């Protein structure tokens, strides 16, 4: 035997020299849940360790994350039923709490990157990402609302807009509105391949945003499809996206790899709520080493080709890095 791959595994130093993939806090975006009011920190029941924060406490949380090296945050507001309507009007009301919160976050921490989500569901009485009429999700009518939402978020200071709605043509529509209003510097991270997945349920608990009727299969992608992700990627590129995202991540590593091989744009992976909750639940039962499984699964997303990972594990990973 003149080939012995084990020689390159014989010590920690050599193992680290031949390591092909590196995971850093710089790769991570931390999704945070925002609620109205003050002095509120409420744990999401299906996501142990993840909280909904009022702005005052969110500012403290962001500060502690910055100290750990996390510089990018995705802010998701939760609205009470009483503020929701058919047209998601609250999503672009300039007086609404989440837009004021983004302004405050950006003025307090000008150097961080703030991302916002564009979709109707947290503000919609129907709980769908688009406008519902007779049980149907209207595409082009939804675009008008998404455009107003994206504009309002850009005005509030968002660095990256994340359309998560999966309507056709939304990236181009939003790019156009932003450019026309001189928000040329605002980036778009498109949820390019967003699947109709059962892994989003804890997120919908966090925002009370589950659909009231039906499912999201007429706009989110069929988990059976890979080729269709290439079609979506092609459209998003042509329409002006700056980043392409795959969501969920763990069950879709092949999609991450395929998009990576077919674009010059950076790829983001969204390590979604259900993926977080599964690991946490197994950890709580003592069935898995939660920290190791977290690190291994995040690493697998980078190895698959993701440049950026949106993950609820961001802070826990950063704390772990600091310990080592
Ligand atoms: C809203 C949105 C969802 C997620 C991100 N943006 C939920 C959905 O599409 O139903 C899911 C994130 C997660 O599960 O962590 N359109």
Image: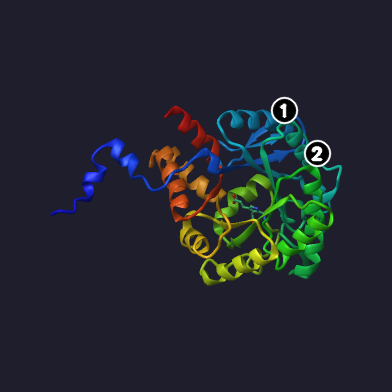
Q: Which residue is mark 1?
A: 39
Q: What colour scheme governs how the chains and residues are painted in the rendered image of this protein?
A: rainbow
In x, y percent, where is residue 219? 66, 67
Residue at 42% from the left image edge and 29% from the top image edge? 324
Residue at 53% from the left image edge and 71% from the top image edge? 227
Q: Quadrant of residue 73?
A: top right
Residue 231 against residue 316 in the figure, above or below: below
Asked which secondary structure carries label 1, the reply is: loop
Pick the front one: 11 or 210: 11
Distance between the Cα atoms at labels 2 and 1?
17 Å
In x, y percent, where is residue 161? 71, 51
Residue 286 against residue 124 in the figure, above or below: above
Crowding near the residue tagged with mark 2, few <14, some 14–19, many ≥20 C-alpha atoms within 10 Å: some
Crowding near the residue tagged with mark 1, few <14, some 14–19, many ≥20 C-alpha atoms within 10 Å: few
Q: Which residue is mark 2?
A: 100
In x, y percent, where is residue 199? 55, 55
Asked which secondary structure carries label 2, the reply is: helix
């Amino acid at each position: 035997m003149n080939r012995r791959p084990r020689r390159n595994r014989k010590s920690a130093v050599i193992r680290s020299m031949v390591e092909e993939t590196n995971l850093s806090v710089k790769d991570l975006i931390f999704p945070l849940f925002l609620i109205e009011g003050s002095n509120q920190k409420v744990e999401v029941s299906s996501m142990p360790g993840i909280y909904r924060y009022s702005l005052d406490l969110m500012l403290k949380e962001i500060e502690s994350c910055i100290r750990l090296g996390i510089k990018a945050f995705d802010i998701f507001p939760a609205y009470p039923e009483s503020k929701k309507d058919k047209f998601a009007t609250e999503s672009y009301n300039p007086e609404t709490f989440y837009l004021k919160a983004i302004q405050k976050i950006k003025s307090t921490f000008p150097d961080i990157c703030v991302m916002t989500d564009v979709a109707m569901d947290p503000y919609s009485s129907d709980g769908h990402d688009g406008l519902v009429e007779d049980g149907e999700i209207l595409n082009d009518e939804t675009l008008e609302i998404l455009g107003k939402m994206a504009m309002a978020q850009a005005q509030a200071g968002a660095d990256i807009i994340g359309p998560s709605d999966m309507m056709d043509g939304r990236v181009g529509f939003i790019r156009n509105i932003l450019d026309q209003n001189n928000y040329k510097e605002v980036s778009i991270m498109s949820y390019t391949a967003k699947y109709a997945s059962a892994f989003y349920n804890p997120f919908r608990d966090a925002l009370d945003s589950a659909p009231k009727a039906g499912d999201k299969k007429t706009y989110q992608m069929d988990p059976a499809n890979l080729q269709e992700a290439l079609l979506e990627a092609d459209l998003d590129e042509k329409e002006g996206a700056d980043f392409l995202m795959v969501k969920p991540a763990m069950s879709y590593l092949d999609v991450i790899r395929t998009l990576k091989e077919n674009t010059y744009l950076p790829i983001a992976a969204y390590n979604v709520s259900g993926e977080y909750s599964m690991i946490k639940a197994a950890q709580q039962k003592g069935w898995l080493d939660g920290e190791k499984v977290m690190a291994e699964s995040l690493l697998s997303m980078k190895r698959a080709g993701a440049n950026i990972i949106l993950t609820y594990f961001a802070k826990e990973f950063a704390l772990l890095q600091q310990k080592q």
